[in-house]
Image (tube, rainbow, N blue to C red):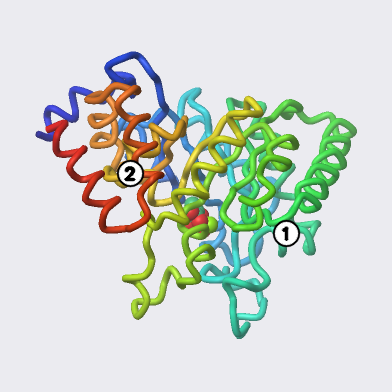
Amino acid sequence: VNRELDEMRDLPAETTDGHRVHLLANMGLLTDIRFAQTHGAEGIGLYRTEIPFLAYHDFPTEAQQFTLYQKVVEGMGGKPVTIRTLDIGADKYPPYVSIARSEPNPFLGWRSIRISLEVSETFKMQLRAILRAGALGPVRLLIPMISSLEEILRVKAILREVKTELVWRRVPFDDDMELGIMVEVPAAVQVVHRMVEEVDFVSIGTNDLIQYLLAVDRGNLKVASLYEPFHPAVLAALNQVIRAAKDNGKRVAMCGEMAGDPLSTLLLMGMGLEEFSMESLSIPVVRKLVRSVSYERAFAIGQEALRMDRVDEIKRYLFSEMRALG
Ligand code: PEP
Ligand code: MG
């Protein structure tokens, strides 16, 4: 089986009737790049920059960050790299950030873009490093935890400032870098039709979206059984985001765990998801599934699943459809 998957590595993730999707890798450390390449990733769909930041003794400088991002861009050899700005707080704290680890509800608290917008010098430093890395290859900028239109507009204003600085400094950077937001807060789903107008792409973060939609802490074992990607409320939200993006002609990706779950592949593709970003190890199996079905069939499966109102029914249905493909 492994050899079979290996041989498929360079084949496109394309359905039997020619519908193409894209399979990308999530990464945190530079060592992940090799895995992404050997598993046939078409690019990096999520670079969690807070992961390398955890290893520093202080916020890495613009130069340190640039060197880091440069290695990623070069390591991917011309394939797109989606760099997400710092997503700290909640469960990820660099030791030098003395933020309130004692917050009673850290996942509902001071985290991610909320921190970036307040500690804006640090945010600007990261934006400069990312924009400069864009001069070396295709880089996309991804902003986490967006929960309102105002946040996007503030990010865009800061980006304009930072670009002016870079022009003034006469350093090369990508002035046309694609800007995307994570859709991982239910409020963003509700106003996604308006949000997509402000950006070039959206990436659905199911890890957080599921926990916030279902009010289930993603890290709490006691409620782990309630953490359910195939909850009809989750599927309806995903469908809403994908529709809104496509109606606006914007690219729609997913970079939460669900993107790499084979049980969801047919469903998500059928809903119209274009980019799946996952742990590299999952790419070969998802590629095999995509290549074994027609888009027409996947679309029908998506429609059918969206009509169902019970988790067990949805999962049984998806499982039987997956098995029918061999
Ligand atoms: C997500 O929330 O789905 C996601 C990809 O981001 P993280 O897991 O880093 O919070
Ligand atoms: Mg998240």
* Residue situated in front as seen by the camera: 51 or 179: 179
* Residue situated in front as seen by the camera: 315 or 259: 315
Residue 253 lies, with reference to residue 256, above or below; the image says above
Q: Quadrant of the N terminus?
A: top left
Question: Which residue corresponds to the image point at 14% horizontal and 34% vertical from the top-left?
Answer: 324
The three-letter amino acid code for the residue at tag 1 is Ser
Q: Position of residue 218 (x, y in %)?
A: 43, 68
Q: Earlier in the sequence, mark 1 or mark 2?
A: 1
- Tell me, yes or no, if residue 271 can be seen here: yes
Q: CA distance from mark 1 to mark 2?
A: 33 Å
With 256 as the anchor, is 108 left or right in this view?
right
Secondary element under disc 2, as helix, strand or loop, is helix
- Tell me, yes or no, if residue 51 can be seen here: no
Instruction: Give me the disc on residue 264.
Output: 2
The three-letter amino acid code for the residue at tag 2 is Ser
Instruction: Give me the disc on residue 1.
Output: none
The part of the image, by quadrant, that contains residue 281 is top left
Q: Nearer the viewer, mark 1 or mark 2?
A: 2
How many numbered discs? 2
The part of the image, by quadrant, that contains residue 129 is top right
Q: Position of residue 277 (x, y in %)?
A: 43, 40
Q: Position of residue 191 (x, y in %)?
A: 69, 48
Question: Which residue corresponds to the image point at 14% horizontal and 39% vertical from the top-left?
Answer: 323
With 197 as the anchor, is 49 left or right in this view?
left
Can you tell me whether the CB of the residue at mark 2 lies under 8 Å from the nearest atom of ligand 1?
A: no
With 60 as the anchor, is 121 left or right in this view?
right
Per the image, the residue denoted by label 1 is 116
Can you tell me whether the CB of the residue at mark 1 lies under 8 Å from the nearest atom of ligand 2?
A: no
